[in-house]
Amino acid sequence: MSTAPEPGVLAGLEAWRDLPRRHQPTWPDDEALGRVGTELASLPPLVFAGEADVLTARLGAAGRGEAFLLQGGDCAETFAEATADNIRNKIKTILQMAVVLTYGGSLPVIKMGRMAGQYAKPRSSDEETRDGVTLPAYRGDAVNAYDFTSDCRVPDPRRLVEAYHRSAATLNLIRAFTTGGFADLRRVHEWNRGFTANPAYARYEEVAGEIDRAMRFMAACGADFDALRTVEFFASHEALLLDYERPLTRIDSRTGTAYDCSAHFLWIGERTRQIDGAHVDFLSRVRNPVGVKLGPTTTADDALALMDKLNPNDVPGRLTFITRMGAGRIRETLPPLLEKVTASGRPVTWVCDPMHGNTITSASGFKTRRFDDVLDEVRGFFEAHRSVGSVPAGLHVELTGDDVTEVLGGSEAIDDDGLARRYETLVDPRLNHQQSLEMAFLVAEMIRSS
Ligand SMILES: O=C[C@H](O)[C@H](O)COP(=O)(O)O
Ligand SMILES: C=C(OP(=O)(O)O)C(=O)O
Ligand SMILES: [Mn+2]
């Protein structure tokens, strides 16, 4: 039997419409947008509210130091790349990283994709100019097409429906992979052995060997490896397009409260976290676990105000702060935030995004990041938490399972010239498969020595 919505819930879900909202497309046709909203509202939810509650509990544990979050995937998913191969390679990469981190931290790792809905982007500029021609910026496949023609760049609300269907198909395959045997710990471990067998990554052999011995020890003790053939995997994206998130928000029949059923976890970006803005208001009214990106200008009072608004009842795991300060600034900007928030005694799960504060343009003109800067921000994150006594609870990374060349460095030493070899991202540069695994091994070493 369904429970009626709690009083005021439905009206509250419309409050964002009267608030300032940044980075929304200028849809050319309101009626077409309205029809799309009605269609999306009639489609089945992509996740079940009970799954979101499980994730809240898991993130609460991470906030207490009893688990560690690994959240990864593309900066911007694309419709064209929502293929079986791409999805499989990304899942495989995340699972491989998770095994290494589980061993490094002796903690359960919560696995979460920036997947099955990461189709919308805030942009620094509303326009893009090429060879003297200026067109609206690409805002993600849920809004417009990347091709540089005026037709392609017009926002088309039908793309929201396409984003829903691609997300549904992606999530379906993720569920199949993670429950059907693909994620078997023994297989994932074998993939990692393959990685460290490459002489370029020989320095990680030792940890892989230790994991091997730990697995043999478990086997000798009679551990039930068949119980480790499946894993929990959660979907997440930035809740940027409120014209998409609102129709996918549903009243949970168990409780009469609202959940945004487009994903298990939604986050608010650095550019849309205004305390009186539409995004914070909207996510304050759904019950999923939510995140907020915090850049280097964030004050401790900003953080406390977000806690008041997004987690007034202090539910552990409800609110994650994803800090993205930049390697050069994290050691100065993060500790004051941690101190004040920790002094409040209120629960927050702190996660490090070492990507977005470290974006540069290479001499050859590519938007890129240095692997060493990314690693240094993670190191600064652990140092800051250690100095304050708070809990470093996870990592948020832009990655792909393929051999792209978008981030400088790593053991394969991708250099400026090398970027051109396989630079495929439409927005931000991603760690490739090898760089992602390398990062997991390096972070595991960091966790063990911290
Ligand atoms: O992913 C993050 C932002 O959307 C992205 O960094 C903005 O990129 P831009 O500065 O190229 O617009
Ligand atoms: C837009 C993003 O990040 P931020 O909001 O931190 O800039 C992102 O995660 O792709
Ligand atoms: Mn990005």
Image: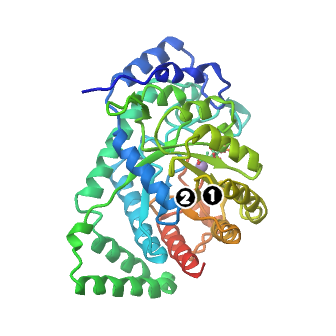
- In the rendered image, which quarter contains the C terminus? bottom right
Q: Which mark is residue 397?
A: 2
Determine the residue positioned at 49% across, 81% down. Answer: 201
Q: Quadrant of residue 280?
A: top right
Distance (Cα) linking label 2 and label 1: 6 Å
Mark 1 or mark 2, which is nearer the start of the sequence?
1
**Residue marked by disc 1:** 355
Closer to the camera in the image, 269 or 307? 307
Task: Please say if 427 is above or below 443.
Answer: above
Measured as percent of width and height from the top left, residue 58 is found at 43, 56
The kind of residue tagged 2 is: Val
Measured as percent of width and height from the top left, residue 167 is found at 38, 40
Measured as percent of width and height from the top left, residue 259 is found at 43, 34
Q: Quick one: label 1, few (<14), some, or many (20+) residues within 10 Å?
A: many
Is the CB atom of the residue marked by disc 1 within 8 angstroms of ligand 3's nearest atom?
A: yes
The kind of residue tagged 1 is: Met
Numbered marks: total? 2
Q: Is residue 314 left or right of residue 132?
A: left
Q: Is residue 298 left or right of residue 234?
A: right
Measured as percent of width and height from the top left, residue 351 is found at 58, 58
User: Do the residues under discs 2 and 1 have CB atoms within 8 angstroms?
Assistant: yes
Q: Quadrant of residue 160?
A: top left
